[in-house]
Amino acid sequence: MGAGAPAYSTSKATLNALTCVLAAELHGAGVLVNAVCPGWVATDMGGPGGRPVAQGAAGIVWAATLADDGPTGGFFRDGKRLPW
């Protein structure tokens, strides 16, 4: 929450809050809610120099295929929890 584009920062804060709220609301319903960061990926938007698309996508696939008893309400990159 430092300097920079206010719209970008507030949109990220909103998504983080929504992740926490939905995870709490759906706790026990068999639905896991997590946020996933693919990191800097070499795409049209990310530009050259980023990691390969498959590497960025792997963390997203990991989150989408978590077991029913997996983590919920967290923020992850490459299957590792990150601080909000």
Image (cartoon, helix red, strand yellow):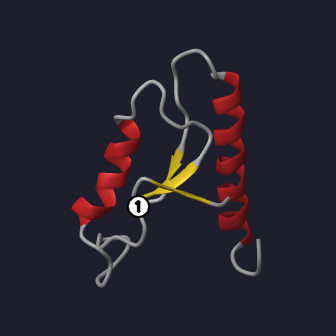
Percent across and percent down for residue 4 are 70, 79
At x 27%, y 63%, the residue is: 55
At x 65%, y 61%, the residue is: 83
Which residue is more in the foreground, 84 or 52? 84
Question: Residue 56 vs residue 1: left or right?
Answer: left
Percent across and percent down for residue 21 are 72, 34
Which residue is more in the foreground, 12 or 25? 25
In the rendered view of the protein, which quadrant contains the C terminus? bottom right
Percent across and percent down for residue 11 are 67, 56
Q: Circle 1 — which element?
A: loop
State whether residue 13 is above or below residue 9: above
User: Which of the 4 image quadrants contains residue 72?
Assistant: top right
At x 40%, y 73%, the residue is: 40
Question: Residue 31 vs residue 17: left or right?
Answer: left
Which residue is more in the foreground, 25 or 79? 79
Percent across and percent down for residue 30 are 51, 18
State whether residue 46 is above or below residue 24: below
State whether residue 33 is above or below residue 77: above
* Mark 1: amino acid: Pro
Which residue position holds label 1? 38
